[in-house]
Amino acid sequence: MPEASPQPVFRFAPSPNGLLHLGHARSALLNADLARASGGRFLLRIEDIDLERARPEFEAAIYEDLAWLGLDWERPVRRQSEHFGDYESALERLEAMGLLYGCYCSRGDIAQAVAGRPDWPRDPDGSPRYPGTCLALTDEDRAARRFSGQYGARRLHMGRALARVDAPVAWREYGDEAEPRVVRAEPGVWGDVALARKDVPTSYHLAVVVDDALQGVTDVVRGADLMPATSLHRLLQILLDLPAPDYRHHSLVLDAEGRKLSKSSASTSLRALRAQGVTPAQIRLMAGLAPAG
């Protein structure tokens, strides 16, 4: 683990599964602005654990778009797909604490298990909370599945995890005020979340926590849609004895219908805006930021 940095460390961490849009520009520019204003460092991280969706052409476009915006970042860039061993080490620590269990349920299995129960709780991403089906499996059941070549997800036993935490889980949140406020975390709303999938040996939640610690990130600045995830991230940081960054969850850039921009909804990309003659200075204004100083 790196020693505490004497400088603030900010990062922008996109996934190369599509082209960047105005929402990404807002987050990247905010991080770079705050790093510059505080005399800190600005990192770029490529979050490409989803090997099926990550594409080299999208990664190349990220570098091109950010350079066009006038941003510079430290090298080398950390690419998550090159560091699966770091995430496996974190999983092994959680496993040794008795906090993980194997799960062989598909999304269809989970949907079927809670079918007909409209009151069944959902996690912040909108998916039904895992009903604990595989908790009933015996060690013999699990051994037989592994022997037959079945490799499932690894889920966090939320009840046991919360029982290991003595103090309330919380984080420092910076907004427009000079002083931060303390936000009480609610990791239980995620239920027994999967920290590694059968097809990918980690998850966004685990990888981002491990990466931020290894890179010495002191300030996490990201969209307000990720605020619920911070509850889970703070729990993982406590369980793994990792430092707690300060957080700032900024407002989102919305489309004409009031929906957040996204790759999946084909929001207009920075590349398309550049082709239309939009300048980097205009991008700042369109992203709701003040002109560069």
Image: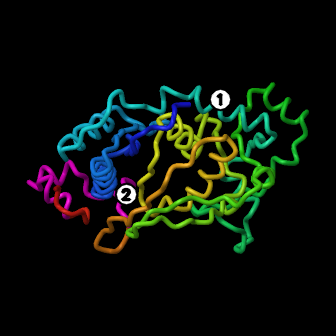
Q: In the image shown, does 197 or 99 lie closer to the viewer?
A: 99
Residue matched to label 2: 262
Position of 57 relative to 26 (above/below): above
Position of 187 relative to 217 (above/below): below
Q: In the image shown, does 236 or 83 lie closer to the viewer?
A: 236
Q: In screen coordinates, is 216 left or right of 158? A: left
Q: Position of residue 276 (x, y in %)?
A: 11, 55
Crowd rating for badge 2 (residues with CA inside 10 Å; few <14, some 14–19, many 20+): many
Residue 228 falls inside the magenta stretch: no
* Amino acid marked by disc 2: Ser
* Amino acid marked by disc 1: Ser
Residue 271 falls inside the magenta stretch: yes
- Residue found 44% across the figure and 50% down from its top: 219
Residue 14 visible? The answer is: no
- Residue found 47% across the figure and 35% down from its top: 215
> Upstream in the sequence, badge 2 or badge 1?
1
Residue matched to label 1: 89
Q: Position of residue 166 (x, y in %)?
A: 77, 55
Can you tell which quarter of the image residue 118 is in? bottom right
Q: Position of residue 36 (x, y in %)?
A: 27, 47
Can you tell which quarter of the image residue 150 is in? top right
- Residue found 12% across the figure and 50% down from its top: 275
Identity of the residue furthest to the left in this view: 277
Q: In screen coordinates, is 238 left or right of 27? A: right
Q: CA distance from mark 2 to mark 1?
A: 32 Å
Q: In screen coordinates, is 242 left or right of 4? A: right
Look at the image and give the residue range highlighted in magenta: 260-285
